[in-house]
Image (spheres, rainbow, N blue to C red):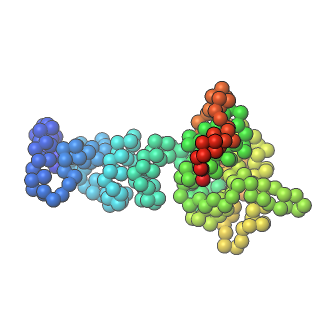
């Protein structure tokens, strides 16, 4: 109604001001009809009908979208954040669907938007289409991101893979949030006895929707083709040692600091086990700053000297 009135009669902001007052008088026991909220309603309406000037047609289209895309299934404030932060309707509907699927709180939704999940999800290079049956192949591809955002940790430029692994496990809640819904943490440096030798995966998860074990290998440098052979070996070992008849095929994820997509594609093209390769980023701590920070041992000693108990 606001859009129609303002387009046909060229009514300005005073119309909305008066409408807000009238609604409060008419519905004294209801909230949500403030001047600012009416503007948000107008913004929401126009956002989902970009490029069409016919108001009556807009109304029918919006009603259809509301039904098809479940915009009414998430709280109004969620809808407001999505419209304000999204550049396109496709991006907005992506976050609407993800909110419904994962039951995101507003803070989690805002985190996912700020870290550009729409741009990252499903962008990893994989061989899932060839190695996994439909629809598991699509679901597995959708789960992967590129790059992964590990800005909840800080490491120096000289950090090693174990340092990255340590930090991710120390921040397991944030790590699982970045991985996405369905990942259950099974352990780090998971021991695999093959023949007379012991081998250890970096991180092992189980995905509850895919019904699959998921191995995550971490590399602090650029992708190298030989990394795929090792990950392929781990997948075979998990399939033989842990996987049973109720589990689907084990999936391997290789996370590297950087990668050449062409080299990655060549490396996994003829591999017959499902493997995906992505980059990751984290906060980099300069060496000169790190050198001035107390170690964990020094920090605990200070607390002990002051008789401060830590858990």
Outermost top residue:
288
Q: Residue at x 46, y 46 (%)?
A: 111
Q: Where is residue 291 in the image (x, y as percent from the top left)?
A: 67, 29
Do we see residue 242 in this rendering? yes
Say which quarter of the image contains residue 226.
Answer: top right
**Residue sitting nearer the eye, 69 or 40:** 40
Say which quarter of the image contains residue 69.
Answer: bottom left
Q: Which residue is drawn at 75% across and 62% down?
A: 238
Outermost bottom residue:
245
User: Does residue 191 lie above or below 243 as drawn?
Assistant: above
Q: Residue at x 71, y 49 (%)?
A: 217
Do we see residue 281 in this rendering? no
Q: In screen coordinates, is 307 left or right of 62?
A: right
Q: Where is residue 287 in the image (x, y as percent from the top left)?
A: 67, 28
Q: In screen coordinates, is 114 left or right of 299?
A: left
Q: Where is residue 121 in the image (x, y as percent from the top left)?
A: 54, 48
- Total marks in image: 0
């Amino acid at each position: 109604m606001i859009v129609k009135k303002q387009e046909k009669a060229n009514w300005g902001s005073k119309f909305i001001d008066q409408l807000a007052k009238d609604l409060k008088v008419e519905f004294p026991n209801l909230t949500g009809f403030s001047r600012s909220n009416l503007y948000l309603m107008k913004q929401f309406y126009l956002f989902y009908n970009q490029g069409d000037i016919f108001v009556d047609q807009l109304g029918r289209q919006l009603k259809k979208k509301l039904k098809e895309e479940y915009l009414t299934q998430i709280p109004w404030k969620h809808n407001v954040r999505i419209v304000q932060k999204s550049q396109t309707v496709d991006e907005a509907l992506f976050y609407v669907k993800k909110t419904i699927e994962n039951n995101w709180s507003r803070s989690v939704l805002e985190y996912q938007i700020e870290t550009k999940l729409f741009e990252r999800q499903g962008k990893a290079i994989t061989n899932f289409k060839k190695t996994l049956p439909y629809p598991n192949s699509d679901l597995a591809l959708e789960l992967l991101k590129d790059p992964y955002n590990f800005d909840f940790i800080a490491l120096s430029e000289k950090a090693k893979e174990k340092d990255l692994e340590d930090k991710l496990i120390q921040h397991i809640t944030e790590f699982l949030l970045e991985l996405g819904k369905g990942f259950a943490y099974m352990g780090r440096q998971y021991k695999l006895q093959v023949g007379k030798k012991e081998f250890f995966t970096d991180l092992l998860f189980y995905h509850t929707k895919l019904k699959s074990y998921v191995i995550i290998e971490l590399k602090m440098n650029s992708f190298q083709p030989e990394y795929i052979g090792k990950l392929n070996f781990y997948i075979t070992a998990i399939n033989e040692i842990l996987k049973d008849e109720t589990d689907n095929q084990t999936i391997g994820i290789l996370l590297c600091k950087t990668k050449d997509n062409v080299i990655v594609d060549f490396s996994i093209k003829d591999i017959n086990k499902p493997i995906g390769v992505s980059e990751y980023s984290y906060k980099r701590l300069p060496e000169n700053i790190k050198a001035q920070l107390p170690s964990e041992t020094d920090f605990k000693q200070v607390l002990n000297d002051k008789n401060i108990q830590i858990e």
